[in-house]
Image: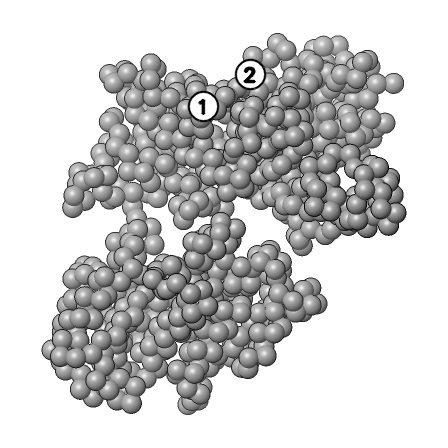
Amino acid sequence: MSSIHAALEIGTTRTVLAIGEAQSGGRFKVTCHAEIPSSGIRKSQILSIPDATQSVRSVLREIERRQDAAGAKVTIGNAMLAVSGQHILATHADGQAIVDSGKVGDSEMQEAARRLREIPIPKGRELLDIVDQDYVLDNLGGITSPRGMSGKVLKLNALQIHADANRLQDARSAAEGAHLEIREPVFAATCAADAVLEDHERRNGALVLDLGGGSTGYAVYSDGYLLSAGVIGVGGDHVTNDIAHAFQTTNAQAERLKLDEASAMLGQYSPETARVHVSGFSALMDSRTISRRSLDTVVNARFKELFTVVRETLEEQDLFHRLHSGIVLTGGGAGMREIDALAGQELGMNVRIGRPIHVDGLENEKESWKYSAVAGALLYAHANFEEKSILDGIFGRFFK
Amino acid sequence: MSDVSPMLLIGIGTAGAKIARGVSRAYGDDLRFTLADTDASTGEGGGDFTLLGGDRLSGRGSGGDIVAARLAAEDSVQSLDSRLEGVRLAVIATCLGGGTGGGATLEALRRLSSLGIPAIVFATTPFMFEGQDRQRNARGVMSMIEDAASATFFLPLDKLVAGEDNMESAMRRAIDTVAGGITLFWRLIEKPGYIKLDADRLRHLLSSAGRGRFSVVSTQGTNRASEAVEKLVESELLATASAPARAILCGVLAGEDLRLSELGIVADGVRNAFGDHASFALGTVNDEATFCGRLAVVVMVFESKSVDPEDQPEPGAPNGGRRRRRSAKGGSSLGVGPSGRGRFNNAEPTIWHGEDLDIPTFIRHGINLDF
């Protein structure tokens, strides 16, 4: 029997739900996905559980409508939850084992892993993931498989990714209000990376930037494993806010200007004299035009600053020079016009837009980068919960 | 009426405790102070001491972990309550960069706030050579401390002891300097001379003062007043202003030989140098035994907490320059307040190198727009 999984992302601007099914040959296919505008969320954090619940309810209804139209109906009982927000931290941890026999065997590797998983996280935090990195045997690091090697002390390095427990509970409450059980929360940026990164990029060194509405998640890979991850509390909503403030528009007008008109680069799209039409938002306000150059200047300044923060964050961790394969931009913000060109200019390396390449079913989706995090969360579920399905939720039912 | 001082000095962390003990030595037995640290050995130096998070950290310190220190302080902070009876103003001395200075100070401020006690924080920030981890630790809590405290003074160690080469003597000098400054501040309030700072005005000034800059100079000789002003103007600690001065507190400490003309020179000089439109409060301390022949001037400059971006000068424009053009329509009814935080008004701020990234970049960078 094939396993079916669902993944939810309650984002600042969009609530996204996707379901998918394991295929023969080990691939995973997204069979249905939907998104609706979010409400009650700021900077990736829920400010109103009833509003967020309504968003989840609406996206569930939309998925069911689409399933109906396709001739099959799934009532989803549980889902993975892809989370973001600047409350998420990744901290280094290690587990050690004494190598009594002088030669590393399975028991020492298991002991190091066991000790690693016993390390507590701070009070008020909830563990999202422990990501194993490399082994260190005495002073020799970077070991991927220490079995049979000689030494005295074996250490397993890892990243503990954890989040504010209250913020996660808020997301669970919002989902449960819509009768959707959260199977497990997972970090959106590493999920997105799992969906978009090529294997050679993981090995040679790459940065994945998940450009969300309320925040920007990052994940740095080299030598095949995750070196660092975190969240910068700036996202596409900041661009919208900047535009609204600069041109005294409503947020809805600013969002439209950002999506339809603005460019991250100052160049061919922003000649000095070009004007952009802003329609009136009520009968009391006339339509007007604004300078395209100024619009792009506002957007350019915000993204340049974001990339500077990214650069300095990685330089502080001595990681920037390890990105030999460059940078992969994904998430909703990756659709910003010329964002890849600006990132390349500001960070001085190859940049590409990351679409989910390790799942099927999104090939015809024009803006598939918006679904990277939920696609990665589905892959996580596929790898870790193969024996289960979305039937197991508290309200799960499955009809064919 | 009780003789117990309504002011309490709290030294947090190992270095904070050293500062508090320094103030105690200089001020005398009248000083009401207490110490708190996650490291039990700090208590061995004497003075009233609270071990923070003994069960959690076993008295071994926080190991530079702000989260651990904050949790330790959360476990123990209520034990400070017995020391807070009758306290109307708390002054916290600490050093940022490690775990306890930042983490425990935040918890102490939260407790003080819940009891309605205003707090002033004097905190040193790490030397540049101490590395980015300690710099990042300090930066991470500065804005939170600023939000939680009534007034804050962040004192960069590099500026406090510029030119000092030896690490140990640099730290000692830094601690002595901060302790000296707090001592003079204490005297100004508790042992005033001929000119007393008006209590209501002082309370008002300090209750919502925000981030301040602080320096102390000492001079002697016939031109001591003018030289004090010159030293203040040249002081690195008063040099970095990110916003116009909102208020200035100036204390002149001297022996019986203090002349009225000297007060005039100091008051005019300080006002002219740091903000002639700012609210100005002057006080004196007369202490013949300590200041015979000498003049010490302590100056606190409080900046405006937030600056209306519309009033910020254009980059490169002298004297404020041309104002950025206002839109004829919309305004605050469109939901974007004057600070520019707009929809982020009630959200947790994103602070980077002391800047609030929720405020539009073009405003913070002073980018001029054509409409």
Q: Earlier in the sequence, mark 1 or mark 2?
A: 1
Give amino acid for label 2: Glu
Query: Residue B160: horizontal and vertical position, in percent?
Result: 36, 64
Please give left or right for residue B181 compared with residue B97 in the image. left
Query: Residue A216: horizontal and vertical position, in percent?
Result: 53, 33
Q: Can residue B216 be seen in this snapshot?
A: yes
Give the residue drawn at x 45%, y 46%: B351
Q: Vertically, is B307 above or below A182? A: below
Return the mark for residue B155: none
Mark 1 vs mark 2: tell me if same chain: yes
Q: Disc 1 marks which residue?
A: A344
Residue most extreme to the left: B261
Q: Can residue A64 be seen in this snapshot?
A: no
Query: Residue B98: horizontal and vertical position, in percent?
Result: 53, 59
Q: Which-is-in-front pick, marks 1 and 2?
A: 1
The answer to which quarter of the image holds residue A308 is top left
- Secondary structure of the residue carrying numbered label 1: helix
Give the residue drawn at x 45%, y 32%: A307
Q: Nearer the viewer, residue B16 or A362?
A: B16
Q: Disc 2 marks which residue?
A: A367
Give the residue drawn at x 42%, y 69%: B169
Could you tell me if the residues under marks 1 and 2 are in contact, i.e. CB atoms within 8 Å? no
